Image (cartoon, grey):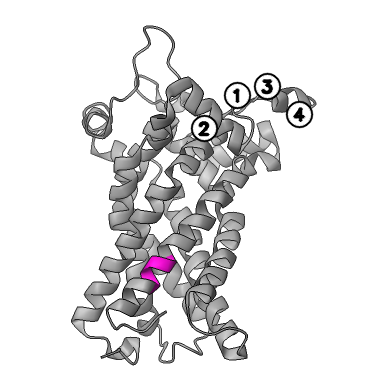
Amino acid sequence: MTTTNTTHASPRDNALRFCFAGIGGMCASFATNPVDVTKVRMQLDGELANQRGQLGKVYKARHYKGIVRGAVTIAREEGVLALYKGLTPALLREATYSTIRIGAYEPIKVLFGATDRHHTPLAKKLGAGATSGAIGSMIAVPTDLIRVRLQAQGHLSTGEQPRYRGFTHAFTDILRKEGFRGLYRGTSPTVQRAVIVTATQVPTYDHTKHTILNHGWMMEGPALHIVSAMTAGFMCAVTTSPVDLIKTRVMNQQIKGIPKSERRYQNGLDCLIKTVKSEGWLGLYKGFIPNWLRIGPHTIVSFFLFEYLRKKAGINPI
């Protein structure tokens, strides 16, 4: 029997929500990993190059010239499989991060006083999204850090050894050289990004969908889910690109044998200031297009599957 409201959801339905959220996120991550790899490379391309007065020169000198040409460059230099670097930690990340941030969104929304899923104030949705995103990201930081570092490894010169040979080697090497705290490097920008992502993505999907339903413009179904997900994906890319770039750079920086005072970035704020000073405000939006092309399809696939699996299990849609 279909659950009538989140407030009356059975333990079985709540458990399935978390499970379906994780499945949707993992499938979406698999589909968008090539875009994610290209995005990371573009975010690191020309890192802190002084662009003042020579924007054109630095722009032309980029190694990864756009999302399509960047992906082609990676495939040509490193092989097609290089576009799936970091897949293992990416899937493990979604198994924790998306399971929690999407699965816990509705229960937390109810805790904030949402009793009618068709007419819930936007503020409660934003609060629920920010809370579930923060919880999920704090748990998933190590997998996110390893994913970024594996995806950042580019073409190697003759005789050059890769920084990490794979997920297990990366995990043990970071633990041995940087300690347990090293696995949580970049936690601050990661959590900030997750709060922004979930507070933008899930509530935008939820609010767009029910606004359309309440006005009678579309009926509940796959078409509505896709339209709502596309809207949520675009808004998410706009709000998260700067903090996503900062997170990538902080996580990827070399720290072994480098005194803390001499490291490229002391923290997320230091990265923000140095990036803007060296590359201008637009530098914060490096990799925006691949970020959008990743978040858009990722949002569509994850929410489409989430809603589809809920329907099959007899659980009301979001």
Determine the secondary structure under disc 1: loop
- Kindly identify which residue carries mark 2: 41
Give the crowd class for mark 2: few <14, some 14-19, many >=20 residues within 10 Å: many
Amino acid marked by disc 1: His
Determine the secondary structure under disc 4: helix
Q: Nearer the viewer, mark 4 or mark 3?
A: 3
Percent across and percent down for residue 123 are: 53, 79
- For the C terminus, which image quadrant? bottom left
Q: Nearer the viewer, mark 2 or mark 4?
A: 2
- Kindly identify which residue carries mark 1: 63
Left or right: where does residue 208 sit relative to residue 302?
right
Vertical placement of residue 71 versus 96, above or below: above
Amino acid marked by disc 4: Leu
- Kindly identify which residue carries mark 3: 61
Give the crowd class for mark 1: few <14, some 14-19, many >=20 residues within 10 Å: some
How many angstroms separate mark 3 from mark 2 (CA)? 14 Å
Q: Earlier in the sequence, mark 3 or mark 2?
A: 2
- Per the rendering, the mark at residue 55 is 4
Amino acid marked by disc 3: Ala
Identified at 41% across, 7% down, the residue is 158
Determine the secondary structure under disc 2: helix
The stretch in magenta equals: 303-307
